[in-house]
Image (tube, grey):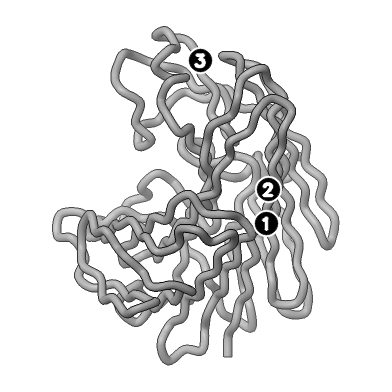
Amino acid sequence: MIQRSAILKNQELEVSILLPEGGCRRSRYDWGGTVEQVSMAGHTFLSRERSGDGGNGLGGIGLTNVFEWRTTALYDETPVAGRFPLLGVGLLKKADTSPFLFTRDYDVLPFQRETEVSPDRIRIRTLPHLCRETAAELEKTFSLEGRTLTAGIRVRNVGPSPLLATEFCHNFFRFDQYAVNSSYRLALPYSIQPKVRRGQLLVERDAYRLGAFDGPTQSTAFWLNGWQGLRSHWMRLTLDETGMSVLIEDDIPLCNFYSWNNAYAFCPEVFAPIDLNPGEERFYTRRYTFQAE
C-alpha cells in the first residue's frame, strides 16, 4: 500500500505531513512533501488555499514550498510539445507558444523520489533528472523539538549548467477557524516598506495588519522591503485575544518578500536565493515555533 501521509508527534505538537504520493499533483507547488496541518492543545494553525469565491485556487495547503526560475529562459527555449524542468516538481510539457504562467496547469512528468519515515524525522529526497542541461538533487527533512517544527532544504546542482532560482514557503496560516482579518498581526525586526499591488494594509513601524481586501479578488497582495542586508530573518504572526502565535525563523539571506492574503489564509512569503554553479549546494532551515494558550 502506498503511504500518502505521515504524522510527527511529541508532547507539544502533532504535525501531519503529506508525502509525495499524497500532496499537490499540479505544476505550481513542490511535490516533495507538504505540511498539511499543525495541531497543539486542540488548536490548529494552517489552512487550505481558497480563491475569493471559496474555490480551491491552485491547490495549495499548509506549508507548501515553491521553486521558481529567475527567468523564463528554459521554458522559452523549449519547443512546443517538449519538456522543461521545474525544481521540486518534474518535467513540465510546453503545450503552445503562450508565455509561461505560474497560474496555468502544465502536464507533469514527476521526478523520482525516495522517502524515509521514522517516529521523529521525515526525509524526502528528489532524484536528479537531466533536462535542458539542468539537473538538481533536492532533499527535504521535517523534525520536531518541543513546540518547534524544523523544515530543512538542501539543493545540489549536479548538472552542467548553473541553477538560478528562488524558493519560498507559501505559508497558508489560519488559526483555528478565525477568518483572516485585521485581528492578525505580523511583526518583523525592521521598519517595513510595503509596495501594495491590491487591497489595503494597516502599517505600523515594524508590523502590519490587513485592511480592506480588493473588491474583484477579495484579497490583498504586496511586496515588502526593509529586510535588505539581513543574513537571516524572523517574523511573528499573532491573533488578537486568542493567545495563538507562530514565530518563523529563516537562516538565509533574503532575496525577496511577498505576501498574498484573503479571508481564508494569511500568507507571508520569504524568498531564498538558489544560485548554484555545477557541483555547488545550499542547505538552509525554516523553524516554526507555535504558541497556544
Looking at the image, residue 65 lies above or below residue 143: above
- Contact check, label 1 and label 3, Cβ < 8 Å: no
Residue type at tag 2: Ile
Side (left or right) of 150 relative to 212: right
Side (left or right) of 47 relative to 12: left
Nearest the viewer among 245 and 18 is 245
The circle on residue 153 is 2
Q: Position of residue 279 (x, y in %)?
A: 74, 27
Give the distance between the C-alpha atoms of the residues marked 3 and 2, in whole angstroms: 25 Å
Crowd class of label 1 (few under 14; some 14 to 19; many from 20; radius 10 Å): some
Q: Position of residue 259 (x, y in %)?
A: 37, 58
The answer to whether residue 4 shows anywhere in this view is no
> Of callouts 3 and 2, which one flags the residue occurring earlier in the amino acid sequence?
3
> Of callouts 2 and 1, which one flags the residue occurring earlier in the amino acid sequence?
2
Per the image, label 2 sits on a secondary structure element best described as: strand
Give the distance between the C-alpha atoms of the residues marked 1 and 3, in whole angstroms: 31 Å
Q: Identify the residue position indicated by label 3 in the image.
A: 83
x 44%, y 72%: residue: 190
The circle on residue 97 is none
